Image (tube, rainbow, N blue to C red):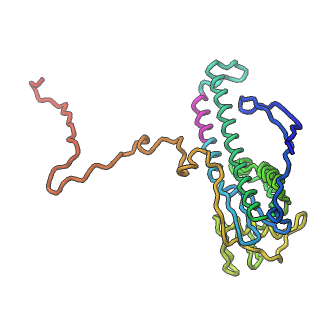
Amino acid sequence: MRPSRSGRSPCCEGGRLFLDVTAEVPVVVYPPGEGPDPGRVAGVDLGIIHPYAVAGPDGEGLLVSGRAIRAEHRMHLADTKARRRAVARRAPKPGEKGSRRWRKYRRRARLVEGRHQRRVRQAQHEAGRTVVSWAVRQRVGVLHVGDPRGVLDLPAGRRHNLRLRQWQIGRLLQVLTDKATLAGIAVRLVDERGTSSTCAACHRRVPKPRGRTLSCPHCRFSGHRDLVAAASIATRTPGGGPTAVATVVLPEVVTHRRAGRHLPGAGRSRRDPRRPPRAARGSVGPRRPAPPPGGESLAQQARIHNTHRKPGER
């Protein structure tokens, strides 16, 4: 079956024009006995540090790290603030026509903003493709995804509200739904309230941890917070309330993946390469060799500038 284009629309983003084409793509056909099984259900927990944490039916788990995406948001915000402080004095007043230099600056700002959005969008697509590929290998037919969009209505301060908006929950859900539907996997939204603060062993509420490890003070259970939440989400019914009496299967084998390898600093290390190296920030540089025993130092002699003159000296 050949894909047929059903719509075209020109769009503009970051000062650049592009063509958005909607196409009808057929669902993947698998050989007999190798396709997704509707009886195999996996839970998906959405987050910021881990955009997708998946708990499979056979003790298999998947963690997709999104620290590179979070670093890209923070570095972009810091660079934007620095650029605005640098050009604040020559910014035109309200109602005043901007200069040619100001128009060039605004054009450059739009290009940088568009590049940032494209980088984040590509990283989100990579994370969704990683989850769907893992689910296909595990023959998972249904994905129970926790819907955390209710937290967007809770005022939590200026800084935390910015983090929630940068999370882009709706886009993560849409990316995962589109790719899963194309692979023949059903996606169902369930209530995820209390999954990150409920023990998977004794089903009691525990204090919400600040880190990645959930520890129960009642039964001494300990596990990864996001994977425990994903395992609890897999047992919940779409459209219903929490099911605390269901058996939760915790992952024993966890696969770690990273989203956004194309982002600055994500390939070699987590340090942003846009920052100058340590030597350029006033480092002392390489150490000098130690002086030989009983000998003189190998360091250069200091030059002493004596400006004091005696009477009669020139």
Above or below 296: residue 196 = below
Q: At 63% from the left edge and 53% from the top edge, which residue is drawn?
A: 67
Q: Residue 35, how many percent across, how many down?
A: 81, 62
Closest to the observer: 33 or 260? Answer: 33
Residue 149 in view in this figure: no
Q: At 16% from the left edge and 50% from the top edge, which residue is drawn?
A: 296
Q: Which quarter shows the N terminus? A: top right
Q: Viewed as shown, does residue 255 lie left or right of 310?
A: right
87 in magenta: yes
Q: Main secondary structure of the magenta part?
A: helix
Q: At 59% from the left edge and 38% from the top edge, which residue is drawn?
A: 79
Number of marks: 0
Closest to the observer: 14 or 254? Answer: 254
Q: Quadrant of residue 99?
A: top right
Q: Which quarter shows the C terminus? A: top left
Residue 312 in view in this figure: yes
Q: Residue 93, how many percent across, how many down?
A: 68, 23
Above or below 35: residue 114 = above
Q: Residue furthest front?
A: 31
184 in magenta: no
Q: Viewed as shown, does residue 313 lie left or right of 123?
A: left
Q: Residue furthest bottom?
A: 219
Q: Residue 98, how many percent across, how many down?
A: 67, 20
Q: Residue 60, how many percent across, how many down?
A: 71, 69
Q: Residue furthest left?
A: 312
Q: Quadrant of residue 80?
A: top right
Q: Viewed as shown, does residue 205 lie left or right of 297?
A: right
Q: Which residues are magenta?
A: 77-88
